[in-house]
Structure formats: C-alpha cells, structure tokens
Image (cartoon, rainbow, N blue to C red):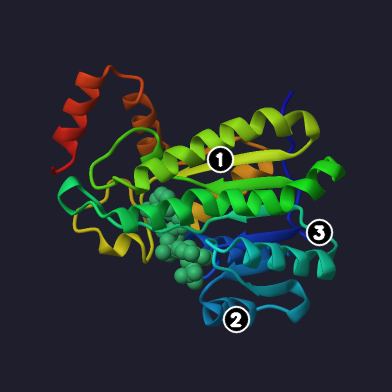
Amino acid sequence: MKQLGIDSFSGKRVWIIGASSGIGAACAQALLSKGAKVALSSRRIERLEQIARAVKPEQTLILPVDVTQQQQIQTAYQSIVQAWGGIDLLLFVSGMYVPLRADNFDINTAEQTIDANLLGPMRAVAAVLPNMLSAHAGHIAIVGSVAGYSGLPKALAYGPSKAGIINFCETLYYDLLPQGVSVHMISPGFVATEATAQNDFEMPALITADQAATEILSGIQKGEFDIHFPKRFSGFLKFLRILPYPLYFWIVRRFVKI
Ligand SMILES: NC(=O)c1ccc[n+]([C@@H]2O[C@H](COP(=O)([O-])OP(=O)(O)OC[C@H]3O[C@@H](n4cnc5c(N)ncnc54)[C@H](OP(=O)(O)O)[C@@H]3O)[C@@H](O)[C@H]2O)c1
C-alpha cells in the first residue's frame, strides 16, 4: 500500500506553522504562487502579514501561534475550520536551535527545545487528527532534520528533539496509512536561513530556503514518507548511521571540528 500524494496544490488548504521565516516562509510563498490557500502561523505576525500582502486577501489567514501553547494551536485550528471547513495539509516547519555542548549544557534551553521542536508538532497533530481520521483524508508533514539520524556535536538538545520527530513520524505512519492520511517526514541538511546564520563553520552542501521548499513540495506531491535533501549530504548521513559506532564516531570526528 502506498500513501497518497497531491496532484495539484491549487485550491488546497494548507496550514503552515513556522511560516514567518526561512524554510517555512519559502514554502508559504511557493504554495501561494501555486494557488493554494495558506493559513500562516508563528509568533511574529508582522512577518506573516508581509507574506500575505503579496496575494489576494482570501488566499491567506493569519493566525498567531506559539507552538508551546496548546490552547493557541487549538484556537488557530478552529479558526481555519470555521473559515475554510478544514485543512488538506498540515505543514509543521517551526523549530529552534541553540548549540549545546557538555560545557554549556543548560536544562532550561533543553526543555524549551524539546517543548518547541517535539511537543510542538505533537500538539498540532493532536489538533488536526480527529477531523483527518473521520474524513479518511489529509496530509501531515513535519520538518525534522538529518541531525535526528544519529548523534552529532553541538546538538545536545536539538539532536534528541529531531530524533524524536523521526520516531514520531514513523509511528504515526503505521496508524495513518490504512486510514488514508499521508505522513511526510522531512529531513533537511543545511539550509541558509536565520537559524543557520549563527553557525561559525562552513556548512557542507548548503542550499537555499527556496531549494528546500521545492524539495519539500515535490516530495509531498509524490506522496513520499521520507523526504530528505540534498541527497548528496542526507544520503551520506544515512549511510553513516548504519556503520558500527567506533567507525561512525571516527568519521564524524574527522569531518567535524570538535
Ligand atoms: N536551516 C537548516 O539548516 C535546517 C536544517 C535541518 C532542519 N531545519 C529545521 O527547519 C525548520 C525551519 O528552520 P529554519 O532554518 O527555516 O529557521 P528559521 O528561519 O529560524 O525559522 C524558524 C521558524 O520557526 C518559528 N518558531 C520558532 N519557535 C516558535 C514557537 N515557539 N512558536 C511558533 N513558531 C516558532 C519561527 O517563527 P516566529 O519566530 O515568528 O515564531 C520561524 O517561522 C526548523 O524545524 C529547523 O529545525 C533547518
């Protein structure tokens, strides 16, 4: 059994959480230009309004959401249901990254990271699932990261939050495939955004946010579960994780300045 894709985004109702910058903003712009109706969510409303200004008012909804607040997610979803009758695609892009190593490990930052990056998507999925299950239709796409494949330096909280996303998507897939609801697990490599602007090292296989959006939308259209890119980097990391640990750690130490 293969999960469904989306023939055309024209007229589709998409809820993007984390639409104000980077990958989420690029996905929003691409979807709007393909004729989708896009509900834009995140905390920085002025950024969302800027995206919406470029298209007809009926094509967008602006719904402020902090993903750590369950009530805000529920309220935003109810507003979409009232305005558009529901959604065809939940695209959860929002995420935070604070480099953490053993010598600056901070439990408050770790809690915030897990709250935003792992519990955030779970809250959004909890909001949309009942309607998708009763309709036997819909798509849930969540942006994780190749940093979730296996342990990498400087990601003491980010890495576990993204590893959790991989397991969450895999586990959702078992239940949703027979119900007609598609799951798309998205694992980008390095993408040039505000989040990665803080990196003080040369990022291998760096791509633009527009390129990332093209990969994401094309994977969703084809009905892919595992959407990872750019393949030259994500494929290499997929290979690394099947190696025995001594070899894995040796290679990572050689490639990454530790
Ligand atoms: N860039 C990369 O190299 C890369 C690689 C792999 C995976 N990723 C993942 O891709 C996703 C997007 O990252 P990006 O690089 O595009 O970063 P970005 O430009 O910093 O965008 C992050 C987005 O998340 C939103 N956000 C953060 N915390 C939020 C919260 N508590 N509530 C609501 N929205 C929140 C931000 O909106 P507001 O601030 O307006 O709320 C913003 O729209 C993240 O999940 C990231 O982990 C990125």
Q: Report the amino acid beneath label 2.
A: Glu
> Where on the picture, by quarter, is residue 159?
top left
- Whichever of callouts 3 and 2 sits on the residue coming sooner in the sequence is 2
Drawn side of residue 6 relative to residue 49, left or right: right
For image coordinates 32% across by 46% down, the residue present is: 205
Q: In front here: 255 or 91?
A: 91
Residue 121 locus on image (x, y percent): 57, 51
Q: Distance between the residues labelled 2 and 1?
A: 28 Å
Drawn side of residue 135 relative to residue 48, left or right: right
Query: Which of the two discs, 3 and 2, sits closer to the camera?
Result: 3
For image coordinates 15% across by 50% down, the residue present is: 103
Quadrant containing the N terminus in the rendered view: top right
Using the image, determine if residue 32 lies above or below residue 104. Answer: below
Q: In front here: 25 or 208?
A: 25
Q: Confirm if mark 1 falls within 8 A of ligand 1.
A: no
Q: Report the amino acid beneath label 1.
A: Met
User: Within 10 Å of the Cα at label 2, are there few (<14), some (14-19), or many (20+) other Cα atoms?
Assistant: some
* SS state under label 2: helix
Q: Distance between the residues labelled 3 and 2?
A: 21 Å
